Image (tube, rainbow, N blue to C red):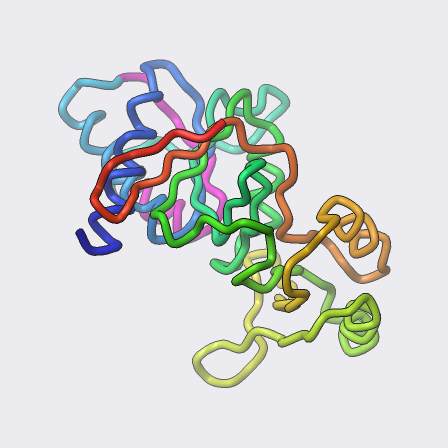
Amino acid sequence: MDLEALKQRAAEAAVGYVHSGMRLGLGTGTTTRWAVERIGALLAAGELADVVGVPTSRATEALMRRVGIPVVELDERGVDLAIDGADEIAPDLTLIKGHGGALLREKIVEAAAGRFIVIADHTKRVHVIGEKKAVPIEIARFGWRRTVSRIEALGARCTVRLDGHREPALSDNGNLLVDAHFGPIGDPRGLEQQLLALPGVFEVGLFIGMADLAIVAGPDGRLEELS
């Protein structure tokens, strides 16, 4: 099976945990798109009712409106269930997220979830977090060169993300996105704390102790649930 088919398999399996009356947190990216479309189809068919969603990006909000999922703001109630993809998944469900540029909003929503399900194809699994992917970091535009130099002093090779016009890419919050290549990370929580302590850093794409379940589609299409 190709990767898109595997993403769809994992996403639609996660939608099996969605029930009528739920408030959902819906993530950003190519895998989560399949979940959003499936939820919209179930609402249209009358198989789900009274489901509303908090989008983690403008792109997800636009898709939700297109498929008929009512959009609500995140409030003090949080969300019952969050569904989102990941860029890396370690055996303990530590994640790297944010290569889609929405890590700050994703972390806010997923920290407010009663349950957080990660969906992915098998290529996202790693033995050690940081093995394949850089850690996305959202930083302030003001003084960004200084902030990047402080991140590099922690052992990273940093790349400021660019858009299609070779200008700095901005998050939905108007901030810069930096991809920090640390290689395999032995102490993700310690690194996260060091990064968040730097002035100018808003959020770090290390999601530690947040995921309750990962649904991963293997190369043959079979699903594995990790918890």
Q: Nearer the viewer, residue 142 or 5?
A: 5
Q: Position of residue 157 (x, y in %)?
A: 69, 75
Q: Nearer the viewer, residue 145 or 212?
A: 212
Residue 214's quadrant in the figure? top left
Residue extending furthest toward the left: 45
Seen in the image, is 30 located left or right of residue 83?
Answer: left
Residue 195's quadrant in the figure? bottom right
Which residue shows up at 81% across the image and 66% down it?
154
Q: Position of residue 104 (x, y in %)?
A: 62, 49
Which residue shows up at 39% across the image and 39% down it?
119
Q: Position of residue 175 (x, y in %)?
A: 65, 63
User: Where 90 falls versus 198 (above or below)?
Assistant: above
Q: Position of residue 27 (x, y in %)?
A: 45, 42
Residue 104 among those drawn in magenta: no
Which residue shows up at 54% across the image and 77% down it?
162
Q: How many marks?
A: 0
Seen in the image, is 48 located left or right of residue 97?
Answer: left
Residue 61 among those drawn in magenta: yes
Which residue shows up at 25% across the image and 46% down it?
6
Residue extending furthest toward the front: 127
Tell me which segment is drawn in magenta. 49-65
Seen in the image, is 223 located left or right of residue 74?
Answer: left
User: Where 32 falls versus 19 (above or below)?
Assistant: below
User: Where 65 falls versus 146 (above or below)?
Assistant: above
